[in-house]
Image (cartoon, rainbow, N blue to C red):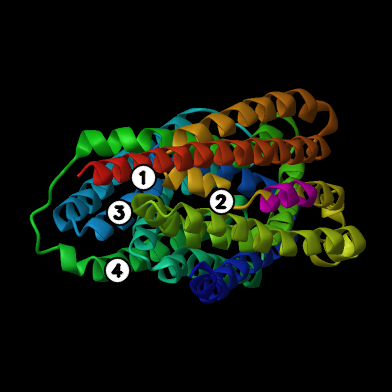
Amino acid sequence: MVGRWIVVGLASTAGMNAIARLLSLAAAVVLGRLLGADGYGAFSFAIACASLISVSVQCGLPQLSIRLVAVYRVREDLPSLRGFLLQSGQLVAAASGVAAVAAVAAFIVLADPVENTRDALIWALIAIPFVGLSALRSGSLRGFGQVSLSQIPEQLVRPGLFLLGALWLTSVGAASPGQAAQVSLVASVLSFLLGAYLLRRQSAGSRATTPIFHTRVWLRSAAPLWGLAVVAVLEREADGILLGLLSTPADVGVFRVATLGAALGVFVTTALNTLTAPEFAKYYERGERTELVRLLVLTSAVGVVPSALLFVAIATFGPEVVAALFGGEFVLAYPCLVILAAGQLGLAASGSTTTLLSMIGKGGTAAKVFATTTVLHIGSSAMLIPRYGAIAAAVVAAASMWIRAVALTYYVHKHLRTWGQKMETLAKRAAVADGAK
Protein backbone atom coordinates (compact mmCIF):
# COMPACT_ATOMS: atom_id res chain seq x y z
CA MET A 1 0.00 0.00 0.00
CA VAL A 2 2.75 2.43 1.00
CA GLY A 3 4.94 1.65 -1.98
CA ARG A 4 2.27 2.25 -4.62
CA TRP A 5 1.27 5.81 -3.75
CA ILE A 6 4.67 7.03 -2.61
CA VAL A 7 6.38 6.37 -5.94
CA VAL A 8 3.87 8.53 -7.80
CA GLY A 9 3.79 11.21 -5.11
CA LEU A 10 7.56 11.30 -4.71
CA ALA A 11 8.13 11.71 -8.43
CA SER A 12 6.17 14.96 -8.56
CA THR A 13 7.04 16.25 -5.07
CA ALA A 14 10.77 15.54 -5.27
CA GLY A 15 10.84 16.87 -8.81
CA MET A 16 9.36 20.19 -7.73
CA ASN A 17 11.63 20.31 -4.71
CA ALA A 18 14.68 19.71 -6.87
CA ILE A 19 13.57 22.41 -9.31
CA ALA A 20 13.03 24.82 -6.42
CA ARG A 21 16.52 24.22 -5.06
CA LEU A 22 18.07 24.58 -8.51
CA LEU A 23 16.16 27.84 -9.05
CA SER A 24 17.39 29.13 -5.68
CA LEU A 25 20.95 28.10 -6.51
CA ALA A 26 20.69 29.77 -9.92
CA ALA A 27 19.47 32.99 -8.28
CA ALA A 28 22.40 32.76 -5.86
CA VAL A 29 24.81 32.44 -8.80
CA VAL A 30 23.30 35.51 -10.48
CA LEU A 31 23.24 37.63 -7.32
CA GLY A 32 26.64 36.37 -6.15
CA ARG A 33 28.27 37.54 -9.36
CA LEU A 34 26.25 40.78 -9.39
CA LEU A 35 26.64 41.81 -5.74
CA GLY A 36 29.91 40.09 -4.88
CA ALA A 37 30.55 38.18 -1.66
CA ASP A 38 29.98 41.23 0.56
CA GLY A 39 26.74 42.33 -1.12
CA TYR A 40 25.31 38.84 -1.35
CA GLY A 41 26.26 38.28 2.28
CA ALA A 42 24.40 41.44 3.33
CA PHE A 43 21.29 40.28 1.45
CA SER A 44 21.53 36.78 2.95
CA PHE A 45 21.87 38.23 6.45
CA ALA A 46 18.66 40.24 5.96
CA ILE A 47 16.73 37.22 4.69
CA ALA A 48 17.98 35.10 7.61
CA CYS A 49 16.81 37.68 10.17
CA ALA A 50 13.40 37.99 8.51
CA SER A 51 13.01 34.21 8.35
CA LEU A 52 13.78 33.87 12.06
CA ILE A 53 11.22 36.52 13.02
CA SER A 54 8.59 35.13 10.64
CA VAL A 55 8.69 31.58 12.00
CA SER A 56 8.80 32.87 15.58
CA VAL A 57 5.40 34.58 15.23
CA GLN A 58 3.59 31.85 13.27
CA CYS A 59 2.61 30.15 16.56
CA GLY A 60 3.23 26.66 15.11
CA LEU A 61 -0.05 26.88 13.18
CA PRO A 62 1.38 26.00 9.72
CA GLN A 63 2.73 22.74 11.16
CA LEU A 64 -0.48 22.06 13.11
CA SER A 65 -2.60 22.68 10.01
CA ILE A 66 -1.12 19.62 8.28
CA ARG A 67 -2.26 17.34 11.11
CA LEU A 68 -5.60 18.94 11.97
CA VAL A 69 -6.86 19.36 8.44
CA ALA A 70 -6.04 15.71 7.73
CA VAL A 71 -7.68 14.56 10.99
CA TYR A 72 -10.84 16.65 10.49
CA ARG A 73 -11.17 15.27 6.99
CA VAL A 74 -10.92 11.69 8.29
CA ARG A 75 -13.57 12.48 10.91
CA GLU A 76 -15.66 14.46 8.38
CA ASP A 77 -15.82 17.31 10.93
CA LEU A 78 -16.42 20.22 8.52
CA PRO A 79 -17.44 22.81 11.17
CA SER A 80 -14.15 22.35 13.07
CA LEU A 81 -12.22 22.35 9.79
CA ARG A 82 -13.85 25.61 8.75
CA GLY A 83 -13.21 27.17 12.15
CA PHE A 84 -9.55 26.18 12.14
CA LEU A 85 -8.92 27.55 8.65
CA LEU A 86 -10.52 30.89 9.57
CA GLN A 87 -8.94 31.38 12.97
CA SER A 88 -5.45 30.18 12.09
CA GLY A 89 -5.34 32.65 9.21
CA GLN A 90 -6.46 35.48 11.46
CA LEU A 91 -3.89 34.65 14.14
CA VAL A 92 -0.95 34.33 11.75
CA ALA A 93 -1.92 37.52 9.89
CA ALA A 94 -2.22 39.54 13.09
CA ALA A 95 0.98 38.24 14.70
CA SER A 96 3.04 38.56 11.51
CA GLY A 97 1.73 42.05 10.80
CA VAL A 98 2.56 43.33 14.28
CA ALA A 99 6.01 41.72 14.17
CA ALA A 100 6.78 43.22 10.76
CA VAL A 101 5.75 46.74 11.77
CA ALA A 102 7.67 46.56 15.05
CA ALA A 103 10.81 45.16 13.42
CA VAL A 104 10.81 47.71 10.59
CA ALA A 105 10.35 50.55 13.08
CA ALA A 106 13.20 49.21 15.20
CA PHE A 107 15.63 48.96 12.29
CA ILE A 108 14.71 52.43 11.04
CA VAL A 109 15.52 53.89 14.45
CA LEU A 110 18.52 51.73 15.31
CA ALA A 111 21.90 51.73 13.62
CA ASP A 112 22.69 49.36 10.78
CA PRO A 113 23.68 46.05 12.54
CA VAL A 114 25.83 44.93 9.61
CA GLU A 115 27.38 47.10 6.94
CA ASN A 116 25.11 47.76 3.94
CA THR A 117 22.16 45.73 5.31
CA ARG A 118 19.69 48.35 6.56
CA ASP A 119 17.67 48.72 3.32
CA ALA A 120 17.75 44.97 2.71
CA LEU A 121 16.54 44.30 6.25
CA ILE A 122 13.61 46.70 5.96
CA TRP A 123 12.36 45.19 2.68
CA ALA A 124 12.89 41.64 3.95
CA LEU A 125 10.91 42.39 7.12
CA ILE A 126 7.98 43.82 5.15
CA ALA A 127 7.61 40.38 3.55
CA ILE A 128 7.05 38.64 6.93
CA PRO A 129 3.19 38.55 6.84
CA PHE A 130 3.16 37.16 3.31
CA VAL A 131 5.72 34.49 4.16
CA GLY A 132 3.80 33.47 7.29
CA LEU A 133 0.44 33.21 5.55
CA SER A 134 2.03 31.33 2.65
CA ALA A 135 3.40 28.74 5.11
CA LEU A 136 -0.07 28.35 6.62
CA ARG A 137 -1.71 27.96 3.21
CA SER A 138 0.88 25.35 2.22
CA GLY A 139 0.32 23.33 5.40
CA SER A 140 -3.45 23.40 4.95
CA LEU A 141 -3.22 22.21 1.35
CA ARG A 142 -0.99 19.35 2.47
CA GLY A 143 -3.61 18.42 5.07
CA PHE A 144 -6.17 18.26 2.25
CA GLY A 145 -3.92 15.72 0.56
CA GLN A 146 -2.86 18.16 -2.17
CA VAL A 147 0.86 17.79 -1.54
CA SER A 148 2.01 18.60 -5.06
CA LEU A 149 -0.42 21.50 -5.36
CA SER A 150 0.77 22.94 -2.06
CA GLN A 151 4.31 23.18 -3.39
CA ILE A 152 3.58 25.15 -6.55
CA PRO A 153 3.50 28.65 -4.96
CA GLU A 154 6.52 28.19 -2.69
CA GLN A 155 8.63 25.68 -4.58
CA LEU A 156 8.12 26.86 -8.14
CA VAL A 157 6.51 30.30 -8.38
CA ARG A 158 8.44 32.18 -5.69
CA PRO A 159 11.97 30.96 -6.55
CA GLY A 160 11.16 31.27 -10.26
CA LEU A 161 10.01 34.87 -9.89
CA PHE A 162 13.01 35.65 -7.72
CA LEU A 163 15.37 34.28 -10.36
CA LEU A 164 13.67 36.38 -13.04
CA GLY A 165 14.02 39.40 -10.79
CA ALA A 166 17.70 38.69 -10.23
CA LEU A 167 18.23 38.43 -13.98
CA TRP A 168 16.40 41.74 -14.42
CA LEU A 169 18.73 43.37 -11.88
CA THR A 170 21.66 42.03 -13.87
CA SER A 171 20.29 43.54 -17.08
CA VAL A 172 19.89 46.90 -15.35
CA GLY A 173 23.50 46.88 -14.23
CA ALA A 174 24.43 48.06 -10.76
CA ALA A 175 22.36 46.61 -7.91
CA SER A 176 22.31 46.64 -4.13
CA PRO A 177 21.28 44.17 -1.39
CA GLY A 178 18.20 46.34 -0.82
CA GLN A 179 17.09 45.96 -4.43
CA ALA A 180 17.56 42.19 -4.19
CA ALA A 181 15.33 42.20 -1.09
CA GLN A 182 12.69 44.19 -3.01
CA VAL A 183 12.66 41.52 -5.69
CA SER A 184 12.28 38.86 -2.99
CA LEU A 185 9.32 40.78 -1.51
CA VAL A 186 7.50 40.94 -4.86
CA ALA A 187 8.02 37.20 -5.38
CA SER A 188 6.66 36.50 -1.87
CA VAL A 189 3.53 38.60 -2.42
CA LEU A 190 2.68 37.00 -5.76
CA SER A 191 3.26 33.45 -4.50
CA PHE A 192 1.07 34.21 -1.45
CA LEU A 193 -1.80 35.35 -3.67
CA LEU A 194 -1.59 32.17 -5.73
CA GLY A 195 -1.52 29.99 -2.59
CA ALA A 196 -4.56 31.78 -1.15
CA TYR A 197 -6.48 31.16 -4.38
CA LEU A 198 -5.58 27.45 -4.42
CA LEU A 199 -6.63 26.93 -0.81
CA ARG A 200 -9.90 28.80 -1.36
CA ARG A 201 -10.78 26.39 -4.18
CA GLN A 202 -9.79 23.34 -2.16
CA SER A 203 -11.79 24.34 0.94
CA ALA A 204 -14.94 25.36 -0.94
CA GLY A 205 -16.89 22.42 0.48
CA SER A 206 -16.46 23.58 4.09
CA ARG A 207 -17.45 27.21 3.54
CA ALA A 208 -21.19 26.43 3.67
CA THR A 209 -20.90 25.11 7.26
CA THR A 210 -21.03 27.16 10.47
CA PRO A 211 -17.50 27.24 11.92
CA ILE A 212 -16.73 25.80 15.35
CA PHE A 213 -13.70 27.18 17.18
CA HIS A 214 -11.53 25.19 19.60
CA THR A 215 -9.05 28.00 20.16
CA ARG A 216 -7.55 26.81 23.44
CA VAL A 217 -7.21 23.25 22.23
CA TRP A 218 -5.60 24.38 19.00
CA LEU A 219 -3.13 26.69 20.74
CA ARG A 220 -2.16 23.97 23.24
CA SER A 221 -1.62 21.54 20.39
CA ALA A 222 0.38 24.11 18.45
CA ALA A 223 2.66 25.03 21.35
CA PRO A 224 5.18 22.16 21.00
CA LEU A 225 5.11 22.52 17.20
CA TRP A 226 5.75 26.24 17.63
CA GLY A 227 8.76 25.51 19.81
CA LEU A 228 9.99 22.95 17.29
CA ALA A 229 9.60 25.39 14.40
CA VAL A 230 11.44 28.16 16.26
CA VAL A 231 14.40 26.02 17.25
CA ALA A 232 14.48 24.53 13.73
CA VAL A 233 14.74 27.96 12.11
CA LEU A 234 17.30 28.98 14.72
CA GLU A 235 19.32 25.91 13.82
CA ARG A 236 19.01 26.77 10.13
CA GLU A 237 19.64 30.52 10.27
CA ALA A 238 21.82 30.97 13.37
CA ASP A 239 25.13 30.60 11.55
CA GLY A 240 24.25 33.18 8.90
CA ILE A 241 23.16 35.66 11.56
CA LEU A 242 26.17 34.99 13.80
CA LEU A 243 28.55 35.28 10.86
CA GLY A 244 26.98 38.65 10.02
CA LEU A 245 27.34 39.88 13.60
CA LEU A 246 30.70 38.33 14.53
CA SER A 247 32.54 38.00 11.21
CA THR A 248 32.12 39.69 7.82
CA PRO A 249 29.32 39.96 5.20
CA ALA A 250 31.61 38.07 2.81
CA ASP A 251 31.63 35.08 5.19
CA VAL A 252 27.83 35.19 5.28
CA GLY A 253 27.71 35.09 1.47
CA VAL A 254 30.21 32.22 1.28
CA PHE A 255 28.34 30.21 3.90
CA ARG A 256 25.00 30.84 2.20
CA VAL A 257 26.35 29.51 -1.10
CA ALA A 258 27.65 26.39 0.66
CA THR A 259 24.30 25.89 2.39
CA LEU A 260 22.37 26.09 -0.88
CA GLY A 261 24.74 23.63 -2.54
CA ALA A 262 24.61 21.10 0.30
CA ALA A 263 20.80 21.32 0.41
CA LEU A 264 20.64 19.76 -3.06
CA GLY A 265 21.45 16.43 -1.43
CA VAL A 266 18.33 16.38 0.74
CA PHE A 267 15.75 17.40 -1.84
CA VAL A 268 14.32 13.86 -1.76
CA THR A 269 14.20 13.84 2.06
CA THR A 270 12.49 17.24 2.07
CA ALA A 271 9.99 15.99 -0.49
CA LEU A 272 9.35 12.90 1.63
CA ASN A 273 8.70 15.06 4.69
CA THR A 274 6.16 17.05 2.70
CA LEU A 275 4.55 13.96 1.22
CA THR A 276 4.38 11.78 4.33
CA ALA A 277 3.23 14.29 6.98
CA PRO A 278 -0.53 13.84 6.40
CA GLU A 279 -0.04 10.08 5.93
CA PHE A 280 1.71 9.74 9.31
CA ALA A 281 -1.21 11.63 10.91
CA LYS A 282 -3.80 9.36 9.26
CA TYR A 283 -1.98 6.11 10.09
CA TYR A 284 -1.64 7.16 13.72
CA GLU A 285 -5.29 8.24 13.93
CA ARG A 286 -6.38 4.84 12.56
CA GLY A 287 -3.93 2.85 14.70
CA GLU A 288 -2.10 1.42 11.68
CA ARG A 289 1.31 0.98 13.32
CA THR A 290 2.74 -1.41 10.72
CA GLU A 291 2.07 0.96 7.85
CA LEU A 292 3.51 3.88 9.80
CA VAL A 293 6.77 2.06 10.59
CA ARG A 294 7.08 0.83 7.02
CA LEU A 295 6.70 4.38 5.73
CA LEU A 296 9.36 5.70 8.12
CA VAL A 297 11.87 3.04 7.04
CA LEU A 298 11.14 3.83 3.41
CA THR A 299 11.89 7.55 3.93
CA SER A 300 15.32 6.67 5.28
CA ALA A 301 16.19 4.18 2.54
CA VAL A 302 15.03 6.44 -0.30
CA GLY A 303 16.36 9.71 1.10
CA VAL A 304 19.95 8.67 1.80
CA VAL A 305 20.81 7.71 -1.80
CA PRO A 306 20.86 11.18 -3.45
CA SER A 307 22.55 12.65 -0.38
CA ALA A 308 25.40 10.13 -0.62
CA LEU A 309 25.75 10.66 -4.37
CA LEU A 310 25.94 14.45 -3.95
CA PHE A 311 28.59 14.13 -1.23
CA VAL A 312 30.79 12.07 -3.55
CA ALA A 313 30.24 14.51 -6.42
CA ILE A 314 31.05 17.55 -4.25
CA ALA A 315 34.19 15.96 -2.85
CA THR A 316 35.35 15.12 -6.40
CA PHE A 317 34.34 18.10 -8.52
CA GLY A 318 33.49 20.79 -5.96
CA PRO A 319 36.40 23.25 -6.41
CA GLU A 320 35.99 23.53 -10.17
CA VAL A 321 32.19 23.91 -9.96
CA VAL A 322 32.31 26.63 -7.28
CA ALA A 323 34.95 28.61 -9.16
CA ALA A 324 33.10 28.33 -12.47
CA LEU A 325 29.71 29.36 -11.07
CA PHE A 326 30.51 31.99 -8.47
CA GLY A 327 34.04 33.19 -9.13
CA GLY A 328 37.13 33.58 -6.98
CA GLU A 329 35.42 35.54 -4.17
CA PHE A 330 33.55 32.41 -3.15
CA VAL A 331 36.46 29.94 -3.15
CA LEU A 332 36.07 29.32 0.59
CA ALA A 333 32.62 27.90 -0.09
CA TYR A 334 34.12 24.58 -1.23
CA PRO A 335 35.41 23.26 2.15
CA CYS A 336 32.23 24.52 3.80
CA LEU A 337 30.21 22.72 1.12
CA VAL A 338 31.94 19.37 1.76
CA ILE A 339 31.45 19.65 5.52
CA LEU A 340 27.78 20.60 5.27
CA ALA A 341 27.08 17.83 2.73
CA ALA A 342 28.49 15.32 5.23
CA GLY A 343 26.11 16.69 7.86
CA GLN A 344 23.13 16.48 5.52
CA LEU A 345 24.00 12.83 4.88
CA GLY A 346 23.31 12.07 8.54
CA LEU A 347 19.93 13.78 8.44
CA ALA A 348 18.93 11.95 5.26
CA ALA A 349 19.87 8.58 6.78
CA SER A 350 17.57 9.19 9.76
CA GLY A 351 14.49 9.62 7.53
CA SER A 352 11.38 11.68 8.33
CA THR A 353 11.74 11.37 12.10
CA THR A 354 10.87 14.99 12.93
CA THR A 355 7.80 14.87 10.72
CA LEU A 356 6.60 11.64 12.30
CA LEU A 357 6.97 12.92 15.86
CA SER A 358 5.10 16.12 14.96
CA MET A 359 2.26 14.26 13.29
CA ILE A 360 1.66 11.78 16.15
CA GLY A 361 1.42 14.48 18.78
CA LYS A 362 5.02 14.15 20.03
CA GLY A 363 6.24 17.44 18.64
CA GLY A 364 7.37 18.39 22.14
CA THR A 365 9.94 15.60 22.09
CA ALA A 366 11.33 16.76 18.77
CA ALA A 367 11.33 20.34 20.07
CA LYS A 368 13.45 19.31 23.06
CA VAL A 369 15.96 17.59 20.80
CA PHE A 370 16.12 20.61 18.50
CA ALA A 371 16.39 22.98 21.47
CA THR A 372 19.30 21.05 22.97
CA THR A 373 21.24 20.77 19.73
CA THR A 374 20.47 24.40 18.87
CA VAL A 375 21.81 25.67 22.19
CA LEU A 376 25.00 23.65 21.67
CA HIS A 377 25.14 24.81 18.05
CA ILE A 378 24.75 28.52 18.79
CA GLY A 379 27.09 28.42 21.77
CA SER A 380 29.83 26.63 19.83
CA SER A 381 29.42 28.87 16.80
CA ALA A 382 29.56 32.03 18.91
CA MET A 383 32.87 30.89 20.39
CA LEU A 384 34.49 29.68 17.17
CA ILE A 385 33.22 32.03 14.42
CA PRO A 386 35.19 35.13 15.52
CA ARG A 387 38.42 33.17 15.07
CA TYR A 388 37.71 30.69 12.29
CA GLY A 389 34.83 32.27 10.36
CA ALA A 390 32.71 30.29 7.89
CA ILE A 391 34.69 27.05 8.33
CA ALA A 392 33.82 26.95 12.02
CA ALA A 393 30.16 27.56 11.24
CA ALA A 394 30.14 24.63 8.80
CA VAL A 395 31.83 22.20 11.22
CA VAL A 396 29.48 23.08 14.07
CA ALA A 397 26.41 22.84 11.80
CA ALA A 398 27.42 19.39 10.48
CA ALA A 399 28.12 18.04 13.97
CA SER A 400 24.74 19.36 15.13
CA MET A 401 22.98 17.59 12.25
CA TRP A 402 24.47 14.22 13.17
CA ILE A 403 23.71 14.58 16.88
CA ARG A 404 20.13 15.58 16.11
CA ALA A 405 19.66 12.69 13.67
CA VAL A 406 20.79 10.11 16.23
CA ALA A 407 18.67 11.59 19.03
CA LEU A 408 15.50 11.83 16.91
CA THR A 409 15.91 8.25 15.71
CA TYR A 410 16.19 7.06 19.31
CA TYR A 411 13.03 8.87 20.43
CA VAL A 412 11.02 7.71 17.42
CA HIS A 413 11.81 4.08 18.21
CA LYS A 414 11.01 4.69 21.88
CA HIS A 415 7.60 6.24 21.18
CA LEU A 416 6.64 3.63 18.59
CA ARG A 417 7.57 0.82 20.96
CA THR A 418 5.43 2.36 23.73
CA TRP A 419 2.53 2.91 21.33
CA GLY A 420 2.76 -0.71 20.13
CA GLN A 421 2.66 -1.99 23.71
CA LYS A 422 -0.43 0.11 24.47
CA MET A 423 -2.19 -1.17 21.36
CA GLU A 424 -1.39 -4.80 22.32
CA THR A 425 -2.72 -4.22 25.84
CA LEU A 426 -5.96 -2.72 24.52
CA ALA A 427 -6.38 -5.60 22.07
CA LYS A 428 -5.94 -8.16 24.86
CA ARG A 429 -8.47 -6.38 27.06
CA ALA A 430 -10.93 -6.28 24.17
CA ALA A 431 -10.42 -10.00 23.55
CA VAL A 432 -10.98 -10.79 27.25
CA ALA A 433 -14.12 -8.66 27.28
CA ASP A 434 -15.45 -10.42 24.17
CA GLY A 435 -14.73 -13.81 25.75
CA ALA A 436 -16.56 -12.86 28.93
CA LYS A 437 -19.63 -12.00 26.88
Image quarter where the C terminus lies is top left
Q: CA distance from mark 2 to mark 3?
A: 43 Å
Disc nearer the start of the sequence (4/2): 2
Tag 4 residue: 197
315 relative position to 42: left or right? right
- In this rendering, which labeled residue sits more in front, label 2 or label 3? 3
**380 lies above or below 306:** above
Question: Which residue has dot 3 on it?
Answer: 71
Q: Which mark is residue 427?
A: 1
Q: Amino acid at mark 3?
A: Val
Q: Main secondary structure of the magenta part?
A: helix
Identify the amino acid type marked 1: Ala
Q: Looking at the image, can residue 383 be seen?
A: yes
Q: Nearer the viewer, residue 58 or 115?
A: 58
Give me the residue at 44% from left, 30% from top: 106
The magenta-colored residue range is 341-349
Disc 4 secondary structure class: helix
Work out how far the residue at label 4 is from the one at label 2, CA to CA, in angstroms: 29 Å
CA gap, disc 1 and disc 3: 23 Å
Residue holding disc 2: 178
Relative vertical location of residue 169 with respect to residue 225 in this rendering, above or below: below
- Judge depth for marks 1 and 2 and give the one in front: 1
Q: Nearer the viewer, residue 57 or 181?
A: 57
